[in-house]
Amino acid sequence: MKTLKGQCRCRAVTYEVADDFAYAVNCHCSNCRRTTGSAFKPLAGIPSEKIRIADGAESVMIYGDEAAPYIHCGICGSLLYAIVKGGTYAHVTMGTLVDTPGIRPTHHVFVASKAEWYEITDDLPQYAESD
């Protein structure tokens, strides 16, 4: 199993994740848009035991509660991943991956709340909410 490296913008925090993602989507919900400052967030889901902070743990900032923490760099603020589904999965922000994952987003979710100024131009399936 190949291990991928990811890191924040300032490179203070590095994580490692198995290239064994269960799914990947483009999320257009307002929370993902606000968190990333972008039209949508490409994310890849993986069991949470397959990701770990490799370097810079002292710079990690955890936002949210224990049930659904968002892992950020405390220096530059980059969102690296979120722990979801009761702690069982991590949603990796694909833009923070240094290495190329074997998975690509297969569909768009929460399209009903997408940014009005953004037009989806690919042929991937679109779901008004979750899939």
Image (cartoon, rainbow, N blue to C red):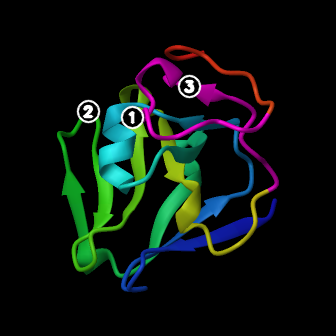
Outermost residue, front side? 117
* Magenta span main SS: loop
Q: CA distance from mark 2 to mark 3?
A: 22 Å
The label number, if any, that marks residue 30 in the structure image: none
User: Which residue is identified by label 2?
Assistant: 67
Earlier-in-chain disc, 3 versus 1: 1
Q: Earlier in the sequence, mark 2 or mark 3?
A: 2
Of helix, strand and loop, which one carries label 1? helix
Where residue 47 sits, quadrant-wise, is top right
Give percent across and percent down for residue 14: 47, 77
Reply yes or no: does residue 118 show up in magenta: yes
For marks 1 and 2, the one nearer the N-term is: 2
Give the magenta-colored segment's residue range: 102-122
Instruction: Kindly identify which residue carries mark 1.
Output: 87
Mark 2 residue type: Ala
Which residue is disc 3 drawn over? 109
- Nearer the observer: mark 2 or 3; the answer is 3
> In the rendered structure, does residue 81 fall within the stretch colored magenta?
no
- Label 3 secondary element: strand
